Amino acid sequence: MRILKGTVSNFRGFRDEREIPLDSNVVILRGPNGSGKTSLVDAIQWVLLGDIPRLKASVLKGDEDYVSNRYATGPPFVEIDLAMSEGTIRISRRGLSRTMQVQVDELEEKLVGEAAQDWINARIGGGGSDSKHAEMLRRYLLQQDEMREFLSADTKERYGFVAGLTGMEQLTRLDSQMTEELKTLRKSLRELEEQTEEAERELSVARTSRTEAREVMARQRPEPSEMGAARSAAVAVLGEEAKGIREPGELLDLLEGRSAAIATLLGQMQMLKERESKTREELDGLPSGSAADLARLEARLEATAAASARLDAARSKAVGELEAARSRADNAQQLAALALEQIDGPCPVCGQDHDVSATREHLESVLAQMPELRDLTERVDRIKEESEAARETLGTQESELARLTSADQERSRAEEILEEVAALREPAVRQIASLIVETGSSASQSAEDLLERGAVRRASIEEASRRVRGALAEERSAERSLRHSESLDAQVETRGERLANLSAETAAHRQRVKRAERARSALGEMLVELSNEVANTSTPLINEIYRRLEVHPTFRTFGFRIQRHRESGHLRPWVYDERRGEDGNAMHVLSAAQLNSLAICLFLALNLERETDLMTAILDDPVQSLDDLNLLSLADVLRTFRLERQVIISTHDETLAELLIRKLRPLRADDSTLVVTLDQWAEVGPRVRAERRDAPALEPELELLRDSGV
Amino acid sequence: MSDPSVEIVRVALLEAGYGLGEVDAEDSFLAESRERVVWCKFFPDAERLIEGWAGAQAEAVERTESLSVEKSWELYLVLASALKPETTKEPGLELIRRDTSYARKILIPGVDGLTGEQIDEYLSPLRPLDTMTLTVSGPDALSRLKDRVAAEGDDDMAKVVGAFEQNRPLFGDL
């Protein structure tokens, strides 16, 4: 596949449409700076990639229009025709960003949009990612500093690039995967070791606990005679009933039950005793009095009540009279007082004068009637006093009667209580007697005696209980210790097994890690060797070109040197002076101009080496950093290169252009060299002139030696 | 100048498709292909070379005066010194190498001390670039690794590479 033609409009240096013929093995683009040579190279990139990485890197996000011509009248447009084995293919791209349209006219089929880009990527670039774009650019296009940037890149980045070009990605992936997985293995080994250490600690703790438990158990083991003595004591206080009981717990229950029963009965008896004493004390404190006394007192009470009633009636009558008299007196007094106030003047009603003397006399007589009222009042008061005295007497007599009645009732109730106490005490006495009195003893013993003996017996039972309880507690403690010791034995065994398993697992894992480390180390060394070998598969070709360009007079051999550092591959360009046995990093040995020559060698070698659909190498103005010898050498190399690839080379240097025209002249009848001149740039774009140099009619022959028989 | 060195250069040029003229008394000879004309001149040492290269060039130009214009641009000088140059002579030799007037100069200092392969390397600009033999296409990198591991006979390494191929944990089989 090679490029036949390019058509450009509204793109960078081209406003009006320009058709640039490129249909030749060698195309020399000549023209002064700014005439559109680089725009044409950019156009070829843009139509294939959809962007220009060289420019894209320098624009801000959103400012995507870095390809339009500044005087454009429409969207940017580029179209190229490619010659392929199956015929001519046309690729075109128009517009920007979202409105960008790409189209591939492949014989009878037309592909647009994504399908078209896929076709381009598959046939020309492969992929479509940024790295693939970069790879594509480096394979097909040499711009001023592209390869130089590669040489100046970080060693790791450079390794990645060459690894990509030489198919070493798998080795790189294996290398990094081994590193990651080994890290994981080491981490799990550390975890296992920690678990083993923890298991060791746990086993040690269990063993210590078991030893301590055994010591405690040895100390706590009860004397066999202790329980026997306790049992004998129990039998002594409980009698035959206790002999048949084998279980110490049952014996203890019996003892405690018996003790509790005695205590309850003793408590009941004590309570009854106290209640009887208290009741008797209350009985003794009640006033004495017979029924006759009460009858007499009731008769007196009735007489007093009758007298009191009579006095009340008299008093009511007297009070009524008194009230009537008081009312009358009040009226008279008010009238008389009024009359006396008005007596010295005319009548306030009729205005006539009174018989003052007669009125005064009358009024004074009215007022004189008042002593009668006072007598009446005194009489009422007297009756009242007598009545109250009679009532007081009546109250006293009623109180006395109530007191005597109450005492009588209290006495009856106390006597009932005493009867009740006696009734309750009887069965209690029988019960307690049955509990504390030995067989054959009399049950008719006094309560005091029973209480005393009951307390003594209860104390004996309590003592027996205490001994049985103590012996039982020791036995139970010993049992618990035994069980604890047995559980610790089981724990020691379990932890021992776990430790053994973990130790075995850790040992196996440690062995695996060692084997993995050894395999990883050996493979790592092998990968370095292999990477060097694979990376340097290109070096014979690079060296052929490197020597032809005569980049350095003594360091005449080039190679890639790959070393591992921190688990990563690092690639350095290396040069050798084999005659003197010297070598060094090309970046340090070569001058800037020599590095540029080396960059051209790398580009041409990589371009030649790889099988590609687009058999084109584009060199955009390489003259800038090459000296005369390098230029002459480059021309020599390109003369051979043209047999393998379509060479498109641009230059602003007229001397180089002339040199290239001479050096790259066609030698075969089917060959030609196309010289495209871009000049007279104006707003509409440059002028384009193409001149085809065809091969001479006759093949060049040996001119000097043809007659010498060679 | 030893005859073997001259012979090595002649054979190299012959194999590159050049026709060869006779070696004259001055240890010079002419070689010509369809594209190029090469004038080879052998000097005993670097000093003589520095002194005599201009004369050799003049002689070559004179000998090629009858060439067509195109071919006259394709004149090359091979200037060889039998002995390895002293360090003091190297700048003088570099000046000659860098002189591009009339012809491109290919210098082979100390040719008697070089192997045939080394001499061949110096003459490479005179040969067409043989991309077919120089481009090595062999098995892919992983296949090479597998071959090496197999040759090594290391079971663990083989297991790791096998696991990698099958996309399994690399150290799972160890």
Image (cartoon, helix red, strand yellow):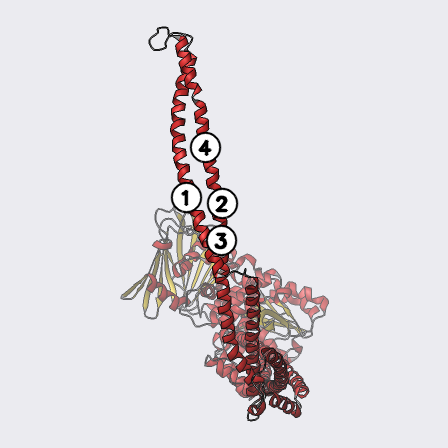
Foreground label between 3 and 2: 2
Quarter holding residue A158: bottom right
- Left or right of A380: which side holds A565? right
The numbered mark 2 sits on a residue in which chain? A
Task: Measure the C-alpha gap from mark 2 to mark 4.
Answer: 20 Å
Instruction: Report helix, strand or loop for mark 2.
Output: helix
Q: Nearer the viewer, residue A650 or A703?
A: A650
Task: Measure the C-alpha gap from mark 1 to mark 4.
Answer: 18 Å
The label number, if any, that marks residue A445 in the structure image = none
Point out the residue furthest to the top here.
A353
Q: What percent of the width, then of the height, locates residue A182?
A: 56, 77
Q: Are labels 3 and 4 on one chain? A: yes
Foreground label between 2 and 4: 4
Label 4 belongs to which residue? Answer: A379
Image quarter (top left, top right, bottom left or bottom right) of the N terminus of chain A: bottom left
Q: Is residue A653 visible?
A: yes
Q: Residues within 10 Å of mark 3 (few under 14, many from 20)?
A: few
Label 2 belongs to which residue? Answer: A392
Q: Earlier in the sequence, mark 3 or mark 2?
A: 3
Q: Are labels 3 and 1 on one chain? A: yes
Q: What percent of the width, then of the height, locates residue A286?
A: 54, 61
**Looking at the picture, does residue A601 appear above or below residue A206?**
above
- Left or right of A675: which side holds B5? right
Amino acid type, mark 2? Glu
**Looking at the picture, does residue A216 appear above or below residue A145?**
below
Q: What percent of the width, then of the height, locates residue A408?
A: 49, 61
Q: Nearer the viewer, residue B172 or A234?
A: A234
The label number, if any, that marks residue A309 in the structure image = 1
Instruction: Report helix, strand or loop for mark 4.
Output: helix
